[in-house]
Amino acid sequence: MGNYFVAMEAAWLVRDVEQIDDAIGVAVSEAGKRLNRANMEYVEVEVGATGCPACGEPFDSAFIAADTALVGLAVEMDVFNADGEEHASRIAKSEVGGALRDVPLSVVEVIETEADDE
């Protein structure tokens, strides 16, 4: 059994918005509220990064068209006592997916972490 850090990407839709910063704020806030209602304060949520196709530099993962934004959120959590990376990713998707219903999620990275000596 191991401990893992699991990073996921979520696609969040924000309607009736004109500015990228507003869309990002609404998406992070709404996701945080849903997670907090599910007593999942241990899950970290922030705006994701997308690499520029021309230069490769990262920029905020958000796009607006017709006053509707698609915001890519980075969702991260620690999973304890999992049987492996695949098991840890399934646990994380199940936990976060239960709180963020109807939000597409994909696992982007799973890293084994050191066990705490208690």
Image (cartoon, rainbow, N blue to C red):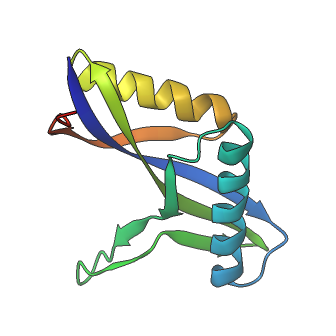
Extreme-front residue of the structure: 118
* Camera-nearest residue between 18 and 73: 73
Examine the image and state in which quarter residue 62 appears.
bottom right
Extreme-right residue of the structure: 16
- Residue occupying image coordinates x 65% and y 55%: 32
Q: The N terminus lies in which quarter of the figure? A: top left
Q: Is residue 21 above or below residue 111?
A: below
- Residue occupying image coordinates x 52% and y 24%: 94
Q: The C terminus lies in which quarter of the figure? A: top left
Relative placement, left or right, of 53 versus 77 is left
Q: Position of residue 99 (x, y in %)?
A: 66, 35
* Camera-nearest residue between 59 and 65: 59
Relative placement, left or right, of 68 versus 25 is right
Q: Position of residue 104 (x, y in %)?
A: 57, 40
Q: Position of residue 9 (x, y in %)?
A: 45, 49
Examine the image and state in which quarter residue 22 appears.
bottom right
- Residue occupying image coordinates x 23% and y 84%: 55
Examine the image and state in which quarter residue 70 appears.
bottom right
Q: Position of residue 74 (x, y in %)?
A: 45, 56
Relative placement, left or right, of 36 versus 1 is right
Relative placement, left or right, of 42 versus 34 is left
Q: Is residue 50 above or below residue 84?
A: below
